[in-house]
Amino acid sequence: MITGRGLTMKGLNYNKIHKYIVTAVCDGPLHIGSSVGGAEEVLIHPVNGLPFIQASSIAGVFRSCCNSIEPQLTEKLFGSAIMDSIESQSRVRISDGIFTRQVIMELRPHVRINRRTGSVASANESGQKFNMEYIGAGAEFTFTIYLYSKKDKPEFKATIDKILGVLRDGGLQFGAKRSSGAGCVHLSNLLYKEFDLTVPKGREDWSMEEELTEDAYDDARIESLPAVADRCKAYTVIVKGTTEGSILVKGIAVNEFGKNAPDSENIQNANGDYIVPGSSLRGALRSQMEKIASYLEKDSLIALAFGTGNDDSETGNTGNLIFSDTVIGDRESNDKMPLFHRIHIDKFTGGVFHNGLFSEKDAAGDMVLKIEIQNSNQPEETLALLTLALRDLAIHTMSLGSGYSIGKGMIKVDTMEILRISDQRKAIIFFGDAPEVKDPAGILTTAFDALKEYGGIVK
């Protein structure tokens, strides 16, 4: 059943109403912070007790997208902070995002690092370990958009269609922890209807808008949405490889119970896949890039790449690197991984702690790391610094997850592919016994020249 009466736009000059019913699916975890519970909890609807996305959050994402693709229309569509006339109010009204099927929740561990010391800070400072709640991948939500337009302003509807085209192609993110890959969604279904208020039929349909069934809407619109060039992204980096041995990114709980259950196991997502979370990949690469930037005397690049303040903080600046969750191997094989037994050693005495035997369940298999670089904050310099860090991953001078001292977390990197969004040209680095670089477009040359010229001399 289709519901949701559009708000009356008192005093605003319009003669057409465009209504969109949007259904989107989460490609990864999604965190919409709660203003009632703890900061790590998701927002819960006060009536039905289920997670939801506030209309203001969706409108903010749409407005930001509009500002990047049609900046001259942003205030005309989404309103102005200076309400000096009727036309300064928003022509777009958006409903809350309501999840339409069962939602699987995830609880993921996080650690805030004190950047001055490089370690977890004391309880009186930012930096404690905490657990954050997420809506799992695969969750589906629906919201409604009303556009109050004019017949002589087709660009209004065209712009909304462009934003929905970006949503279709997975170019919009919602909620917090976006730089760690959270909040990625894609458009899965779209219903549309136009109400022409200059004719009796249009006015009659609008008066009965709440009673209209899905048959009254046009649902063949996803493919016809315009493909908008992604002006926000500069590069996409894809690293393909496989684990050498095993890897362990510890979750906060285990899925097995009993005598032979592990004390800790690799974190899994809502689909049951064993993963390296985007936040863990972000933390590991940040640490390595900080070392490289310090050696090159280009420390200021770290703030541009990763932002300042806490992740997605209102008081900081957003960085230009976005990381995604990485699935490790296949679920069936990792479910059958044998336990890895270890012993707690007292570093002061060299003896074994009482009841010091513990077990871990690792993961192993093929991995595809995906990292995106936004078209801001020195993207070429960021690409060069990131390439150096990923090279260190390939030559085993850095690892992912825990257990580096006993050989865990080593990745055998096969290829690193860099796609330049502006012209769809690629550079590929082949690792192995005889590393090879194929860069006909000079992408890496441009990046390292930019790094060399940036604020110092490359040693």
Image: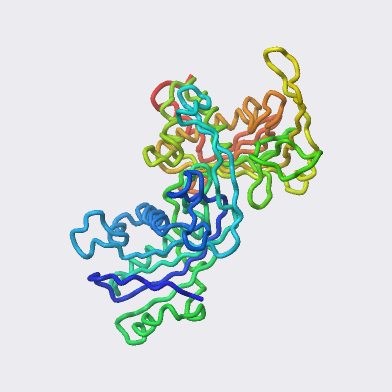
Residue at 47% across, 52% down: 174
Numbered-mark total: 0
Is 162 situated above or below 452? below
For the view shown, which residue lies furthest in the left direction?
Answer: 84
28 to the left or right of 454: right
State the residue in front, 448 or 284.
284
Which scheme is used to colour this image of the protein?
rainbow
Q: How far across and down, in percent of the image, does residue 329 sit?
A: 71, 44
Residue at 53% across, 67% down: 189
Residue at 59% across, 53% down: 137
State the residue in front, 96 or 37.
37
State which quadrant residue 25 falls in.
Answer: bottom right
State the residue in front, 141 or 40.
40
State which quadrant residue 130 falls in.
Answer: top right
Residue at 18% across, 59% down: 84
For the view shown, which residue lies furthest in the top direction?
Answer: 349
Q: How far across and down, in percent of the image, does residue 336 sit?
A: 80, 44
342 to the left or right of 129: right
Q: How far across and down, in percent of the image, does residue 238 sit?
A: 59, 42
296 to the left or right of 150: right
Q: How far across and down, in percent of the image, does residue 296 sit?
A: 47, 21
State the residue in front, 454 or 350.
350
